[in-house]
Amino acid sequence: MLPRTPRPGPRPRVSVIVPARNAMPALTRALTSAMEQTIGIARLEIIAIDAGSTDGTAAELDRLAADCPALKVVHQEPGGGPGRHRNTGLDLARGEYVFFLDADGYLGPDALRRMVAMADQNGTDVVLGRMASPTGRGVPRAVFRHNQLRTDVVGSHAYSTLGPWKLFRRSLIERFHLRFPEDCRTDEDQPFTAAAYLNASAISVVADYDCYHLTRRGTTARNPARTGLTDRIDAIRLLFQTAARYTQPGPRRDHVMRRHIRRELCGALRALPREDETEARTRFLPELRRWATDHCSDALFRTLTAPERLMVHLLRTGRFDDLLTVIRAAKEDAGRGRLVEKGRVYWLHPFFRDPAADVPDDCFDVTDRLPVRHHLTGAAWHGGSTLRVRGRAEVKGLDAGPEDRTELVLRHRDAKDELCVPVTAVDEEGTDAAGGGTVNREFAADIDIATADDGAPLRPGVWDVFLDVRAQGVSRTIRFGNRHDEGLDIGTARRVVAAGPGQRARVTPYFTTPYGNLSLDIGPAPRGAPCEVTEALWHPSDKGTLVVAGRLLPPGTPPRNRVLRLRAEHTDGRVLDHPVRYAAGHPAGAFTARLPVRDLGRGRWTVTL
């Protein structure tokens, strides 16, 4: 092994840690992808750990290291799985950031430059780069719909992906003494990543570039056996312990635990029929019951699907025989019918209202899980202050009837006010529907900014748009807008409108990030701008200097009593002001300013007048 003493030289930006065991021939591509990063090999250190390979991996590492001083090779005995070998890399790492690269994966050429820039500019501790798989292996999709500069586990889908293929700020890892468990047979990366997420100041997402390519199912430095719950139980236990350690009871913990209840706990329950029944009853079920009791709050329980609620209820009440019966018949029971009763919809599972089973109706209630098909087809102004929203919606699985209806619902994000906007049914051609008993699900809703609040203007702030869709006496309220016509540019609907006598408001319809739902931002009408920029270009002889030219508004305004400064503000709060010079011999109010960009330093700067 290499000595664990600091190596001389400047600190690299990124330490790329690569555990490898019998990883040929994929290893060569993995390491080459790191060496050829556009960020530059001089800004990297690559630490490869050979875990007792017998297929030529060790020799290939030594060959590559002989030609690449940035590649450091450690030879270890096998054992401990990837966790042990990644920990060796962490003990040796000197970089500002750490990236864990599997020997059977590879990086996109510009991956590390983009991810480091994202972390630098936004001060984030973890950066997710979009993943791809040339071999068809499943990769996360939801989290990579949009770039996200600063988010967290609640405001994004980041917690759905707990693999280690991310950029981590090393100071975060060392501050919380984060290391991979070495006694887990599989999934040892998930508790590490969960702990990093839950302690990060913020998380960034690079969604516009394929940063990491997954190939085979993680065989890198891994013990070859992967045999069900016996291998997975230790990592699942650590996940629950990690989530409980780094969160407080409440919505944030429920959000995190929901993933572990649904995926890890319910996944383990579904795997029980493949285990030895004696071991399942004596070893696994008691521990799974403890987790369900300790970590599944009532609020979380209500968010589960009906099959999940039924399993968790039977588990928590210790009814292991009934639980195993439910699990074994799950495929057959999934297609059973539904009962609509008093505005609720129930799954007709054999245990539903069976006196012998004695399971609460809540375990079979599927009302809030009924899928609603909805689509936004347009949003445009009609008249001075009326925004017409068009779309369609229906509750899937319920029969249409003459009493069905749809309403547009506006909810103020801060004040929690709720307003209902009636809709007009329209036929496919867009005209008002009339007669014939036909139920139309196409609709149009007119939001009059000046009168929508019971004759009064909408109050300033963000109003989120929902749909309340009703069929067979069942009501489903859902966010609206994330499914819309391709090319629909909601930004073109921004407008300043009349908002009552003598009042004006700026209305900005927009799609939220990351979920893409429709919201309306209502604020005061902007004042007229005091100036405008007419030109911005690089100085022809003073390299690195940006010249900004403009004029005061309205045109012809003389410069007296007008004080302008060109300001550059860094995300860390630093501010630099530069004088604006009025141009002699030019039209009144013309000005120029010089900004020495070369002197600003690294990071994101916002330039304003």
Image (cartoon, rainbow, N blue to C red):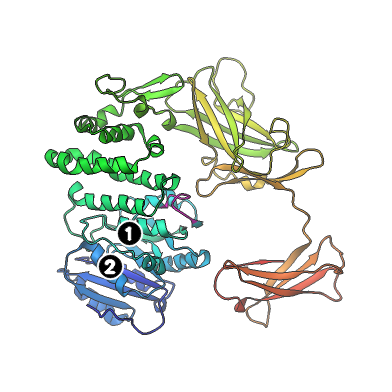
Q: Which residues are magenta?
A: 151-158
Magenta highlight: main SS: loop
Circles 2, 1 touching at the beta carbon (< 8 Å) = no
What is the x, y in percent for residue 277? 13, 38
What is the x, y in percent for residue 551? 80, 66
Q: Residues within 10 Å of mark 1 (few under 14, many from 20)?
A: many
Q: Is residue 110 above or below residue 293?
A: below
Q: Identify the residue under disc 1.
A: 192
Q: Is residue 152 above or below residue 443?
A: below
Q: Is residue 192 above or below residue 160?
A: below
Which quarter of the image is occupied by the N terminus?
bottom left
| Residue 144 in sight | yes
Q: Residue at x 49, y 53 (%)?
A: 146
- Quadrant of the image occupied by residue 590: bottom right
Q: Residue at x 46, y 21 (%)?
A: 343
Q: Is residue 16 left or right of residue 493?
A: left
